[in-house]
Image (cartoon, rainbow, N blue to C red):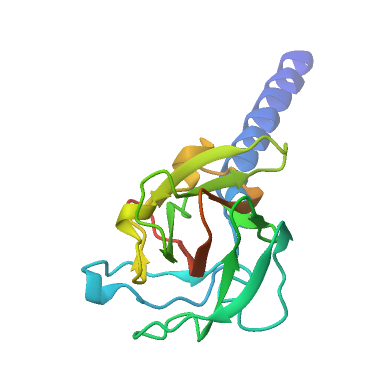
Amino acid sequence: MPIKKAHRTRVVTAFLGAALAGAALPAVASAADCPVESVSQPFASLGDTNDYFLAPGGDFESTLTWSVDGGYAITDADRPDGFGGRRALKLSNGAVATSPAFCVDVSRVHVRLGAVTNDQRPFSQLTIEAIPENGVPVPLGTLKGGNYFSAWTYSPFVSLAPALGLLAGDVQQTKLRLTARGNSWVVDAVSVDPRRGA
């Protein structure tokens, strides 16, 4: 009999331990989420009332923190709304700009950015990619010259977390990469939406 009692005690103890471990899981997942960012609603005039934060160095106002391979310049953004400041990054044809890494989880649903080119031909393109921790580029979207010719235009929603295939509890240090093709492009106000279900 004492042996059976001891066995029953071990079973109850193991069950309670498993239950406590299960109760602790949400706290672990929450701790793994990306930090809370200071946000604003810069695209409200476009009918987009989601909150956004600037990607690291995405306003190009201070020292350039993006790495650039190819010709580039910091130029006057000359945008009437002023979001992201008055400086912008001009990429020559073939130039590639890569942001510093930042935290991406399932709440970082998409990005938007301002762009303009002086070429209205559709083969003048700005490609947008994510570079996750494994270094394999993930295509996010392409902006075409005809839609961004001569005047600043903000991109539509460009998928981020869904394109990376992130699930609840997943966290990735991710970079954004912009490549100018066919002509030069000017970009600014690279912004990330941290809201779910946008």
Q: Is residue 167 visible?
A: no
Instruction: Name which quarter of the figure residue 11 lies in.
Output: top right
Above or below, 94 relative to 2: below
User: How many marks can you see?
Assistant: 0
On screen, residue 144 versus residue 100, left or right, reads left
- Percent x, y of residue 84: 49, 80
* Nearer the observer, 194 or 66: 66
Residue visible at 34% across and 56% down in the picture: 120
* Most distant residue in the left direction: 47
Q: In which quadrant is the C terminus drawn? A: bottom left
Residue in the foreground of this view, choosing between 64 and 166? 64
1 versus 45 height, above or below: above
Q: Nearer the viewer, residue 56 or 31?
A: 56
Q: Is residue 182 visible?
A: yes
Q: Residue at x 63, y 69 (%)?
A: 56
Residue 7 image position (x, y, % from top left): 73, 18
Q: In x, y percent, where is residue 129?
A: 56, 45
Residue for point 57% across, 37% down: 138
- The N terminus lies in which quarter of the figure? top right
Could you tell whether 69 is left or right of 176 in the image? right
